[in-house]
Amino acid sequence: MLRSSSVLRAPFLPQPPSYKLAQHGDGQHETYIEPVKGHTKRVPRAQVYQLASKKETIVAAFIPGAGAASGSSNPGSNPGSSSRNPGSSAAVRWTLVHSHGNAVDLGEMLPLYEELARLLRCNVVSYDYAGYGCSTGKPAASQTLADIAAVLRFLQTELGKRPEDTVLYGQSVGSGPTSHLAAATPSLAGVVLHAPFLSGMRVLNPGWRHWPSALDIFPNFRLVPKIKCPVLIMHGLEDEVIDVQHGRQLHKLCKRPSEPLWAPRRGHQDLEASPEYIPRLRRFLVECWGDEYAAHLRAGGIKL
């Protein structure tokens, strides 16, 4: 998955990107994500933003959770001009921030995010790292840390979402920036690490006894013990890319570990297909967000 100590190399990016940015021809000329690959589903509910991250511009998408008031989506470049503010009292306040894996981009992931927003009845926001999809720049591990920080800052300052109502979700390579931000943000409600690794070097060279720390990237084994909120680890028992032992060791390092999901017969790409995936996520989010969120799920006909 990771082929360099400092760069997430382009051969592992979807090329060309699975989508382009377009603007509606009427109304407020709002930005939307237009799939350019035949198999990619369009998600009209996704509200698209372009955020500053260091010197780059990254693309982010916000999907309101089930139960939110309907209304037009936000324009990508000017959130203040929207006819509906996702931070308003009519909107769902609980938000999942998803950092995706290495070989996909936002356009390919949006259908899954739409399903998560529906099944979990919470907002889902995600983004493309610099160099992925329509985000500018080149992919680099250090840049991803700025990218996820820009998303959380945007959620707070522009959409009015509190860290206490936010759960970070990092999948595969996304576990790196997720762990980094979570370790530095003690007020978060929770963290989900999906098929995470101990560190980049430990994926590439699992047989090494000693690793040159200066060349390593995403040292999750050092960051996870610093996370103060509950942490859910999910890993396929037959993961062919990142061995489940990475997840097991990280679970042991958690300060506040939640009951993990070790999914039988699931590999690196199909953990979401586990019949326990959504139920386990729901129980964890109730653990993070409490009785009011549980009541919100039950109001949607979901039994816990």
Image (cartoon, rainbow, N blue to C red):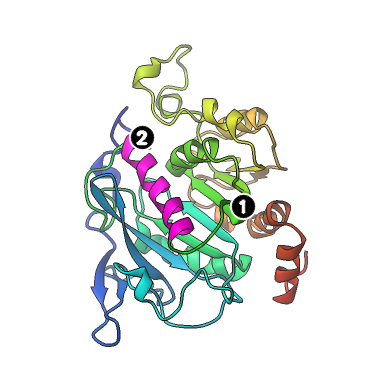
Q: Quadrant of the C terminus?
A: bottom right
Say left or right for 60 vs 135: right
64 or 249, which lies in front?
Answer: 64
Q: Which range of residues does the magenta coloring cover?
A: 142-157
Magenta-colored stretch includes residue 85:
no
Mark number, residue 110: none
Q: Which residue is mark 2?
A: 2
163 or 284, which lies in front?
Answer: 163
Tell me which amino acid carries mark 2.
Leu
Say left or right for 130 vs 249: left
Answer few, some or many: residues within 10 Å of disc 2's Cα (few below 14, many 20 plus, some between 14 and 19): some
In the image, residue 143 above or below residue 88: above
- Residue occupying the point 34% across, 56% down: 105
In the image, residue 242 above or below residue 25: above
- Residue occupying the point 65% across, 46% down: 264
| Residue 182 image offset from top left, x and y in percent | 53, 40
Answer few, some or many: residues within 10 Å of disc 1's Cα (few below 14, many 20 plus, some between 14 and 19): some
Tell me which amino acid carries mark 1.
Glu
8 or 235, which lies in front?
Answer: 8
Magenta-colored stretch includes residue 144:
yes
Can residue 253 be seen by looking at this rendering? yes
Can residue 40 be seen by looking at this rendering? no
Q: Main secondary structure of the magenta part?
A: helix
| Residue 127 image offset from top left, x and y in percent | 38, 56
Q: Which residue is mark 1?
A: 164
Alpha carbon separation for disc pair 2 and 1: 32 Å
The quarter holding residue 65 reads bottom right
- Residue occupying the point 74% across, 64% down: 292
